[in-house]
Image: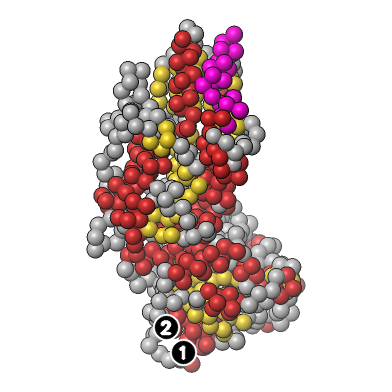
Amino acid sequence: MPLKFDLSAADLSSAELASLKEMRTRCARRILLSTSLAASGHPGGSLSSLDMLLVAYGILRHDPKNPRMEARDRFVASIGHISPGVYSVLAEHGYFNEEDFLAGFRRTGSGFPGHVESIVPGVEWDTGNLGQGLSTAVGMAHAFKLKGLNNRVFCLMGDGEQQKGQIVEAIRHAVKYKLDNLTVLIDRNKLQICGSTEDIMPQCMQKLYGGLGFNAVKLENGHDCNAIYKAMRDAYRNISGVPTVLIAQTVMGKGISFMENKAKYHGSTLPADDLAKALAELGVANDFEQWQEKRKQPVSGKSIMPPRADYPSVQAGEPIVYPVDKPTDCRSGYGNALTSLAQANNKAGQPPVIVGISCDLEGSVKMDGFHKHSPQAYLELGIQEHHAAGTAGAMSCENFVTFFSTFGSFAVSEVYNQNRLNDFNHSNVKVVATHVGLDVGEDGPTHQCIDYLGLMKNYFRFSVFMPADPNQTDRIIRHIAVQPGNHFVGMGRSKTPTITREDGSIYYDADYVFTPGQADWLREGTDATIITYGALTPACIEAWKLLKQAGKSVGVLNMASLLPLDKDAVLAAAKRGPIVTVEDHHVETGLGASAAAVLIDKGLAPKMKRLGVKQYGGSGKPSDLYKQQGLDAESIAKTVLELLG
């Protein structure tokens, strides 16, 4: 039977130690069988971390019958490749049966992937890309602090994994915000894929964590369950304001004599003859062939957990309408909307609903108003974008509306993988990036993010919205706050004219409601259509004026919703005549490419020209940079006229 320890006890009883020994044998058997049956996997680290896993699940609050109970503690397996060890322990506790695991491990559709994923009951987070899990655990721990809850977070990591720089970012966060509800467990077996950790990239983990402010505890024997228990118990009950790391000296392949201390077993499985020897050492029956037969049957997939579905109730607040006679930058529209959301939802004396995260750019991304209103809900994480993106995703899954804001080149290009992992995990993060495109101007090409849509199109659960003016920005920000899911909103730096109708009235007025997948016909026309979005929308309206003076009837379609795309509007434009797409984005991977794909899929081939960024920009005024790349009103109008012949 699974154990639940009495944390008031100074030591584990002889009966508990005997039970742990029996559990270890059963779990070691599963580790060896599962990896040999799949002919792939990671048995060595699973065996070296097994004792820590077993003790941890005897300490943590959890319920196999209710894997997502609100009061549960969190266990994040940052070393996701030790899934055989994690699954074995979860099976021991009754989260699922052994047969589903052994018959399905690493098989398509089974629900037991090669690296831990949250489709497995009891697994909190999809990991596997080393160096990411601590950011996740820190985000969870910080979320509990904001809510005033006593849930605890354990994060199991490898020693080779500590070579990742993002881990240092996460350590600093945990120390700054006094996350004493966080315990890091390091499996210090001193081996990684290519050999000794000391040969590949040496470091002292005790000095790394301790020097940055953790309580660093070294366990001389990471297989002594009583010593592990006492260290974990003390960390679990810690209220010092200081997070804890337990660095456990372990043995790769522990318990199988010919596997111990050999790097090859990091990712090498046992062939049938060696498996027989290993099972004999454990003193268990060799039923490998029987399990092979069972794996010939279709997988059941019955244990697969559905994605998290909880999301807070959010008040959208009252929209702000910006006048025609006073140009405003979209980022100010964002900042004002975020402050308005905080005023409507973050109430004094209650945990916040809206959380804001930025990286040393509070004023530039206009989060200062939010910070002033909700100081506890604003996280200043310094120049640590990789960690910030990861922890934002985790917090967004703990029932917070989490806004992560920095410049486009940092929010998209730099943290592509962190956003990708959030997408895997069905997070609800709101990535709002300012300083996007050539509109960044004088800061030059290193800061001119021109790949935001091209990169975001590679995700499956992100929407992408690019507002045309502060009024549309306001409505989009309120929309993404109310709606669950991952959303990206991008905008430039400069002030922009308010978008109006032909009669001069405000287009995105108080009655406007933003709808994903719906484009807006800012101007109607029968001869051709200009499709655009974001910072270049005013230039396209100016081009419309020039074309009207030339006697041409041209429509202007604002495609603020880029993912999902208004395919019907693209097809409607194709029926009217030639199409010109105009965007402050790499010309080969942006809106033009998306629109062309829509047309090709429908077998349509209207005259079409894609205008966008054809080369890295320079350092100069945005208007000059646009003109240099043919993105000014005159160039746009000229392109339309050429298509019209």
Residue stretch rendered in magenta on the structure? 625-645
For the view shown, which residue lies furthest in the top direction?
A: 551
* Front residue of this view, candidates 421 and 238: 238
Image quadrant holding the N terminus, namely bottom left
Residue 255 rendering spot, x and y as whole percentages: 65, 81
Near-viewer residue (100 or 419): 419
As helix, strand or loop, the secondary structure at mark 1 comes to: loop
Kindly identify the residue that appears in the image at 46 percent across and 75 percent down.
243
Image quadrant where residue 538 sits:
top left
User: Compared with residue 487, is residue 243 higher up or lower down, i.e. above or below?
Assistant: below
Can see residue 432?
yes
Instruction: Tell me which label, 2 or 1, sits earlier in the chain.
Output: 2
Disc 2 versus disc 1: distance between alpha carbons?
8 Å
* Tally of numbered tags: 2
Q: Position of residue 434 (x, y in %)?
A: 47, 43
Q: Is residue 419 above or below residue 464?
A: below
Q: Which mark is residue 12?
A: 1
Rendered residue at 34%/47% (across/down): 338
Inspect this view and state whether residue 91 appears. Answer: no
- Whether residue 126 appears in magenta in the rendering, the answer is no
* Residue that appears at 50% across and 42% down: 435
Mark 2 in CB contact with mark 1 (< 8 angstroms): yes
Q: Quadrant of the C terminus?
A: top right
What's under tag 2, amino acid-wise? Answer: Phe
| Residue 415 on image: x %, y % | 56, 52
Going by the numbered disc 1, the residue's amino acid type is: Leu
